Image (spheres, rainbow, N blue to C red):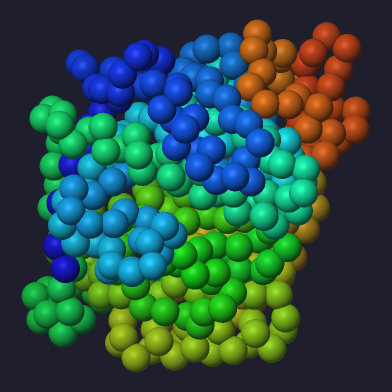
Amino acid sequence: MSLELRKIKITDVKFDDSNKIENGILYLNKKIMEELVTEDKRIKSVSFDIARPGESVRIIPVKDVVEPRAKIDGDTFPGLFKETIEEAGNGITYALSGVAVTTTGPIVGFQEGLIDMSGPAADYTIFSEINHVVMTIKKNDNIDAHEHEEMVRLAGIKLAKYIATIGFEYEDYEAEVYEWESIGERYNKYPDLPKVAYVYNCMSQGLLHDTYFYGRDSKLMLPTLISPLEVMDGAIISGNCVSPGSKTTTYHHENNAVIESLMSRHGKEINLVGIILNPLMTTLKEKYRNIMLTVRTVKMLGVDGVLISQEGFGNPTTDLMHICKGIENEGIKTVIITNEDAGEDGMSESLPDSVTEADAIVSTGNSNESFTIPAMDKTIGDLEAIKRITGGHADSINEDGSLKIEVQIIMGSHNLQGNTFLTAYTK
């Protein structure tokens, strides 16, 4: 498996009569984008805005963030739009970095988020540092919440994929080639380096809490060995409305910080031999099954160490802890990544579950930290949605337009793949 990722750095986005990239500036035609998106007849209307780093702009409620990616010869985000399904992670893929398609509109579920492009809230998210093509989507009246989520999810992916194809004729890109050999080849290639596996937990709980692998709802899966190249190529997309601070957006999947860090160390400090995608389920029986199968797969890989990332909070912490316990009891050193819900003063019990074997924890910060953020000159979406979103409340909007919020309302503020600016230390 070999993937060449061609990254085009986008410095600005502007609306124009044509679609093109010139000198790092992405030009987009609104009419063409509208025609593409409204091919889905469930969509009543769509409008487009641009939000740039440093602007006094607020996007709320944010549903998903997607980095534009597309293959020259093949199917990016396979399993979504075609009957046939190609294996991701091979060939040439174009990625437009510095820009994302971001979806908003009437609220679907209460766990959607906020992105500020400037001000104090901007310091809590990587999304304040990129340009956003914001798509506000309204549904037809007969569409229920699950169809609403689906049409918005597919519209964001479809537009991001289309925008990426604009880069096919643009020659100013940075290319990197990634190789992923068989397990046996990887073992033999770096016999003296410690062998490492990554357990990639993904939300799979229904009720608008789902992830999709090759277009398949992950709650219908069992733990599965995957390639990091598949992840880079759009095999995993977000379809969930979990707490926005800990939500793994499609952008986070495409740019998985754990995978990027492990791949940068592969062949130098470690030998990355496997990634296990594990669905985070709701019932105790399903949890026990997936914990057992994940631990068994790790043991069969014969690794020396494991890194586990989480998604969401609450009962997913049980999966995280007991996978850690099972792996540690096999004599394999394990590190976990989680955020904390420690209350506004940081003094509450920060984790809903814990095991003594979890003695190496990377924290992505306290989601309950509260503060006030100023009004923005422009809001894209619906500011009133803050009254129903996790991290906001009925009295969040002050008379002067400022907002009383918790950190967890900010999209990706304590992302559990570590793609965040927050952490916490033990004193």
Q: Which of 328 and 421 is in front in this view?
A: 421
- Is residue 367 visible in the rendered image? The answer is no
Q: Hey, which quadrant is residue 310 in on the image? A: bottom right
Position of residue 263 measured from the top left corner of the image (x, y, whole percent) = 25, 58
Q: Residue at x 50, y 74 (%)?
A: 278
Q: Is residue 370 left or right of residue 70?
A: right
Position of residue 299 measured from the top left corner of the image (x, y, whole percent) = 38, 89
Q: In this view, does 5 lie to the left or right of 59?
A: left
Q: Hey, which quadrant is residue 187 in on the image? A: bottom left
Relative vertical location of residue 260 with respect to residue 206 in this rendering, above or below:
above
Q: Disc count in the image?
A: 0
Relative vertical location of residue 232 with respect to residue 131 in this rendering, above or below:
below
Quadrant that contains the N terminus: bottom left
Q: Residue at x 83, y 9 (%)?
A: 400
- Is residue 230 visible in the rendered image? The answer is yes
Position of residue 253 measured from the top left corner of the image (x, y, whole percent) = 43, 53
Q: Which residue is drawn at 15% across and 31% down?
A: 169
Position of residue 327 measured from the top left corner of the image (x, y, whole percent) = 47, 83
Q: In this view, does 297 lie to the left or right of 143?
A: left
Q: In this view, does 62 lie to the left or right of 34?
A: right
Q: Hey, which quadrant is residue 66 in on the image? A: top left
